[in-house]
Amino acid sequence: MPTALVAGATGLIGRRLVRLLIESDDYDRVHLLVRRPTGITDDRLVEHAIDFDKLPDAGEDVGSVDHAFCALGTTIRTAGSREAFRRVDHDYVVAFAKLARDLGAQQFAVVSSLGADPDTRSFYLRVKGETERDLEALGLPRLVILRPSLLTGDRDEFRPGEKVSQLLLGITSPLLVGRLGRIRPVSDEQVARAMLGSVKNEGSAVRVIESEDIRSV
Ligand SMILES: NC(=O)c1ccc[n+]([C@@H]2O[C@H](COP(=O)([O-])OP(=O)(O)OC[C@H]3O[C@@H](n4cnc5c(N)ncnc54)[C@H](OP(=O)(O)O)[C@@H]3O)[C@@H](O)[C@H]2O)c1
């Protein structure tokens, strides 16, 4: 049975993903790289409390892995500055992918964002696009990029902007058909399920899953 490695396990999507990994019975070991405990317990789970600035050194206690999942991310508000945001959403994600590759991961699934584009004027989406570009350059055996629209789910942290967007998109959701379907919100559960499902397929070396396709993975 394969071994999984997860970064971002304490987040909205990551926490869902860990529960699905445990429930699936498809993995005999699930390693989590965290900076605080998840509070989830299971015989197959191994939590590694690490300093994410030293990600390259984190592999020693993990050993080899088959599938790696990245749900790391922050906001500029929480991180405190654009630089601090970029360190998490770009630098840590790329460093985690390098580590996963070096530990033998055959599949790497990462949560990016709707509209990710290295050439856009939006700082957030540009960082997401640069991250995707730099992940592709790593030559991972297989890279799956998920680009969700606004996420729904129970979050401990209060994010006013996210709440307002959820309300607006929630009300207008039935009208979001055709090309507008791509901005319809998706749940943490749907994204986590798509991450898990996507690494079970072989296929192209790089697969990008747009928001409107996440429900059907
Ligand atoms: N929110 C949305 O509507 C939306 C839409 C599209 C895409 N996305 C993207 O989806 C991904 C997952 O989103 P989410 O809402 O599940 O994320 P989240 O709940 O904010 O969780 C993020 C994860 O990253 C970790 N993290 C953040 N800063 C860190 C740091 N400095 N060092 C180490 N770990 C750190 C968190 O650990 P701690 O628990 O220790 O903080 C947590 O495990 C993100 O990349 C996000 O940009 C979000």
Image: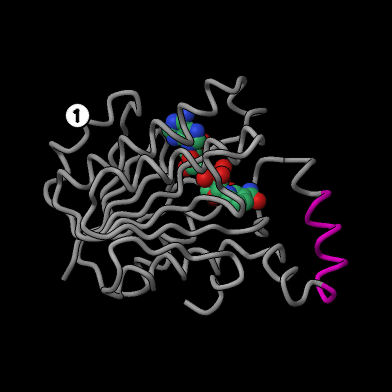
For the point 46% across and 69% down, which residue is it? 194
Asked if the magenta segment contains residue 171, the reply would be yes
Is residue 44 in view from this perspective? no
Q: Is residue 187 left or right of residue 18?
A: right
Q: Is residue 175 left or right of residue 101?
A: right
> Mark 1 sits on what residue?
57
Quarter location, residue 125: top right
- In the image, residue 49 lies at what x, y percent? 32, 34
Secondary structure mostly seen in the magenta stretch: helix
Quarter location, residue 184: bottom right
Which amino acid type is shown beneath numbered disc 1?
Asp
Asked if the magenta segment contains residue 10, the reply would be no
Ligand 1 within 8 angstroms of badge 1 C-beta = no
For the point 49% across and 61% down, which residue is it? 16
For the point 64% across and 65% down, which residue is it? 186
Q: Is residue 171 left or right of residue 122?
A: right
Span colored in magenta? 164-175
**Relative to 96, is 155 above or below?**
below
Callout 1: helix, strand or loop? helix
| Residue in the foreground of this view, choosing between 5 and 118 | 118
- In the image, residue 60 lies at what x, y percent? 13, 36
**Relative to 55, is 149 above or below?**
below
- In the image, residue 135 lies at what x, y percent? 34, 44
**Relative to 150, is 88 above or below?**
above
Q: Mark 1: few, some, or many residues within 10 Å (few <14, many ≥20)?
A: few
For the point 20% across and 47% down, which residue is it? 101
- Seen as rendered, the residue at the extreme bottom is 216
- In the image, residue 119 lies at what x, y percent? 56, 38
